[in-house]
Amino acid sequence: MPDLFRGEQLVVVGRYRDTGASTIELTGKASGKKRSYRYKVEFARKTDREEFSFVSRLWAQKKIGWLIEQIRLHGQKKEYVDEIVRLSTRYGIITEYTAFLADEEVELHATGNLSVAEANVRRCAKVATGAGGVAQSMQSRKMQGAAQANNAPAYYDETGREVTTNKVKIIGSKTFYLKKGVWTDSEYREGMSIVKVKQLSNPYFDIANSQPTQAKYMTFTQSEIILVVIEKKAYKIEPTGR
């Protein structure tokens, strides 16, 4: 880890395998003396606490930044591109390689998405210098060094221009893509059975009351259709009047 000065904050994210009680030990030097701090923690198997939803997105953002840097330094690898596509799709982290995900006509989990991303990697690899190369390098470093998750999808293209999109929404721990007029949960897969529900109807309030932490995913727009996955069930929330 880098040096840490008074008043600065350092955010470290990662993944753990074993759940339950554990101890985290932080060791370093302060004023030339070795210091060690131990903290009792509880690693949960799963949590529905929305205040922690930023952690997984921040981890994914840093991981994508690292993967992009590896591709730039060492060349394209299928497993790197595959992981970038998977994480970008799930968390709405749009890059120069995965910008196509914001296209309304592109199916989120189509088998051809990896091939499209690989083609974008090859195209961007030709821009190793100049404004485009500098912008791509800056973006990967910025993602790796981020202290908070970016909830405004944006990326730098091969010309160095910053590109934003309004076709992706990050709501809490979920990501929604506008697909053919429907805000579609990134966890939705083609073929899932869909339950249609009218906004403000009795079934609508039944779902909201039984899943209070999920209610915001049903209410972020009042005029467009929302396709959301709650507890592995897909619900199409249709505005009143349709």
Image (cartoon, rainbow, N blue to C red):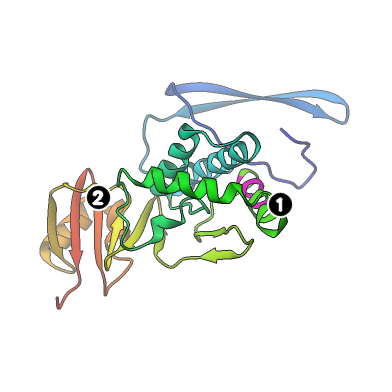
Task: Say whether residue 141 is left or right of residue 112.
Answer: right
Does residue 76 appear anywhere in the picture?
yes
Going 45% across and 37% down the picture, which residue do you hit? 83
Vertical side of 124 occupied by 160: above or below? below
Which residue is tagged 2?
Answer: 229
**Badge 2: residue crowd in 10 Å (few <14, some 14–19, many ≥20):** many
User: Tag 2, which secondary structure?
Assistant: strand
Identify the residue at image location x=59%, y=36%: 75
In magenta segment, residue 140: yes
Which residue lies at the image location 65% right of the left edge and 57% below the top edge?
132
**Residue at mark 1:** 129
Give the spatial CA distance, label 2 vs label 1: 43 Å
In the picture, the quarter occupied by the N terminus is: top right
What numbered label is drawn on residue 212?
none
User: Which of the 4 image quadrants contains residue 175?
Assistant: bottom left
- In percent of width and height, residue 110 lies at 30, 47
From which residue to which does the magenta span run?
Answer: 138-143
Q: Nearer the viewer, residue 15 or 82?
A: 82
Above or below, 199 against 76 in this view is below
Closer-to-camera residue (182/58): 182
